[in-house]
Amino acid sequence: MTSTVRFIADISWRRPANGNVVLAGSPLKLFSLSQAGQTIAECIERAQTLPAGHEVLTERLLDAGAIHPVPSDVDSVLFALSTVTAVIPAYIRTAQEAEMLKSLVASCSALHGVVVVDDCSPHGLPDLGAAQVVRLEKNSGPAAARNAGFAAVGTEFIACIDVDVSISGITISQLLPYFSDDKVALVAPRVKSPTSTSSLGEYEVASSVLDMGETEARVRAGTRVSYVPSAMWLCRTTALRSLSGFDESLRSGEDVDMVWRLNAAGWRCRYQPQVECSHSPRTTLQKFVQQRMSYGESAAPLAKRHPGKLAPATFNLWQTSTWLLVLLGMPFIALGVAIVASASTAKKLRRFPQLRDESFRIALHGTVKSAQSAASAINRVWWPIAFVLALFSQRLRVLFIIAALGPAVYEWWTKRPHLDVVRFALLKMLDNAAYGAGVWKGVIATRTIAPLIPTVKKSATNEE
């Protein structure tokens, strides 16, 4: 257990009437609290030091993503930069990339050491000073390159950093305190794109596929943050070695696979967006589309390794019925189903009187989330099917247009990027379409339809 004795509540945290029930986590869970548990909950809500004996409850809350650690001053001095070795997989194609690598190595000078793995680069590597260079005889991909680098590491922690990332020792020192929890295997910062004057660059600033957002999280499949990109990770060496490193058969998606395997092995992975690094995005539409397609192609191989975790959308039975009725042109019946769903949630929560007013909010929130999930699936993974169906049905045509444009316009409105709504929406649709095309390519290549099948659950909440 962590030496941390302070935590903060997740954004999902709700404790009605300051009582003995907490709704929090991702996915949402219901926690029933004893009198001692209520005291602990109050300390969490006020970010105060916890009383002795808090560990049983806080462990459950941490695992659910309901709370997040606040490292203490003691945690901040437990680990030094000398306990970290950077591993940089390098496939250098241009002089510009060579300079980026040289700059990255220099920025890691405060660490114990730097291991650069030359993945059979077509362009020569620059002078990297004291960095150790491991050369591969053939191009094997980032997973194999990182594994080759891990073999040369003797420190407690490994910083996995890609060539196109800008970072400093300060960034790594801010991530280290989270390892005071001996169950934490991986901590990832927020990966942001630098400011740009091009339309594509501005889109990446606002909607980079590597940017997991501004809210910290326990990283796990099926949650608000289901993975973190390996552009920059700080990892516990023993955790990576316990799983024999990355799966070298994966050319992309190897980072998703690693996070999920770590979780399955009992480790924790964390996303801490208050710590940031910069990542250079693709500079042309062709490279942009190729990148998104490669991410999509990884879905099918990952679905084979992790059954049920690559579903394009997740619904419960009530939500599915509601939106199917809307789609069939029966909105009033759909409204009735939604009311029944709310009553069903209220019945489940009736032994907690303080949650009486929460049942409708939970049902409504779940219905809205299911609509967002369906829209995302339609304009990403299901768009080839939706496009064909839209040719033969006006109702489905309207649905397809709403699913494609609605989320893009909403995202533009909430983020207000330095890019007009038309260009932003067009790039978002291209982004989604390229990913979806990659998914279908992977589905055909691997002969599995798992990434196309939604998950249907019975309930919107779990109880502990």
Image (cartoon, rainbow, N blue to C red):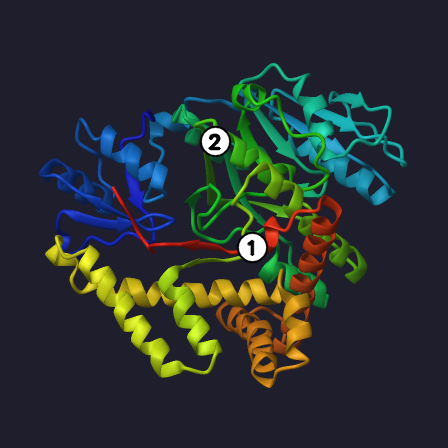
The image's mark for residue 328 is: none
Give x and y (percent) for residue 128.
78, 27
Location of residue 178 with respect to 364 vertically, above or below: above
Location of residue 435 (image quadrant): bottom right
Q: Amino acid at mark 1?
A: Ile
Give x and y (percent) for residue 375.
53, 68
Q: Is residue 139 left or right of residue 237?
A: right
**Whether residue 167 can be seen here:** no
Residue position for label 2:
264
Q: Quadrant of the C terminus?
A: top left
Who is closer to the viewer here, 419 or 319?
319
Who is closer to the viewer here, 121 or 80?
121
**Secondary element type, mark 2:** helix
Give x and y (percent) for residue 62.
33, 37
Q: Is residue 75 left or right of residue 52?
A: right
Location of residue 52 with respect to 221 vertically, above or below: above
Who is closer to the viewer here, 60 or 90?
60
Q: CA distance from mark 1 to mark 2?
A: 22 Å
**Whether residue 113 can be seen here:** yes
Q: Residue at coordinates 63% horizontally, 73% vertically from top-left?
A: 425
Q: Amino acid at mark 2?
A: Ala
